[in-house]
Amino acid sequence: MTPVWTYDRPPRQGLGLMRLRSDPDSPGPDSRDAVALVDAALESGITLLDTAEMYGNEELVGRAIASRRDEVTLCSKFGIRWGDSGRFDDWSVHADAATVVSSCEGSLRRLGVETIDLYYLHQRSEETPIEETVTAMADLVTAGKIRAVGLSNVTVEDVRRAHAVHPVLAVQEEWSLVSRDVEEMLPTLGELGITLVAHSPTGHGVLHRGGATPLGAALADVALVRGASAGQVALAWVHEQGRRRGQPVVPLPGTTSVGHLRDNAAAADLRLSDHELARLDRAALSPRER
């Protein structure tokens, strides 16, 4: 089986599909727009598509990629279940071996595929040892149900323990100018040859708007000079981190808009100067840190 990607040649950028919905009563596009979004992503050179069991849209994603499956690197996640209340904070983590198997079977069925390219544990469990979870995921690799193992929302210790059981291809964590905790994990990922997939690289959309803060002003100024948007500059900042650190980083902006997708794809070609990067870094610090 060919590798999903190699550490020295990861995808340039991905597309997060968390907000993709087919329910006409919920915000987001219908299935026709999902096909247009996937087509636009592939036309823009973005082949890494990321969804999850908990997003409730795997069937929609499956229909959108059905005619172009061989062109897509398909990622999904398992381990988080919604409660019955319907509240956004009502969820629990299930990462035992039986859940790994049943969740994967469900995702394969909903996606309409035989194999998921990259399958993530969505959230670390306080109850199930990560060795049990990853052993079950390794069995899925052997069975041809998934091609690679990923982790999300985990600790450095989790990564080391998991990687000792089976090679971990990618760790998905938030990374942006307003969320930088993952930087403490980077040396371990580099040591183990694991790619960081950086979700929410524009701070859940906050950095698209600029604003009256020092960081908002810095983003707006750089964007004006570069003929770009504040969001594109924020996304370019994440791309530059991989180049500066000599470590692969795959930004994973999420959108349901074809226009925003094309803007995000263009940001991968925006090279920021050392002066611009230093200004953004300085502006992102708290007043006390500055």
Image: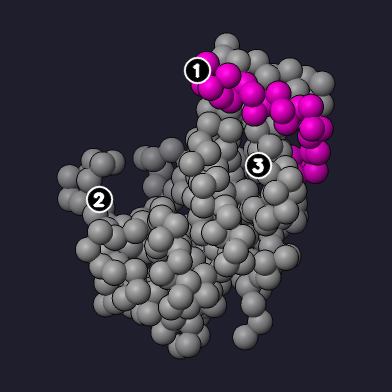
Report the coloring of the rendering.
one colour
Q: In this view, does 33 lie to the left or right of 100?
A: right
Q: Give the Cα separation between the discs numbered 2 and 3.
A: 30 Å
Image point 28% across, 41% down: which residue? 88
- Which element carries disc 1, helix, strand or loop? loop
Q: In this view, does 96 lie to the left or right of 73?
A: left
To which residue does mark 2 refer? 91
Residue type marked 2 = Trp
Is the residue 117 above or below the residue 267 in the image?
A: below
Residue type marked 1 = Arg
Image point 53% across, 39% down: which residue? 180
To which residue does mark 1 refer? 288
Image point 22% across, 63% down: which residue? 127
Please state the extent of the stretch shown in magenta in the rendering. Answer: 264-290
Q: Is disc 2 in contact with disc 1, using a CB cutoff of under 8 Å?
A: no
User: Which residue is nearer to you in this view: 74 or 290?
Assistant: 290
- Which element carries disc 2, helix, strand or loop? strand
To which residue does mark 3 refer? 238
Circle nearer the N terminus (2, 3): 2
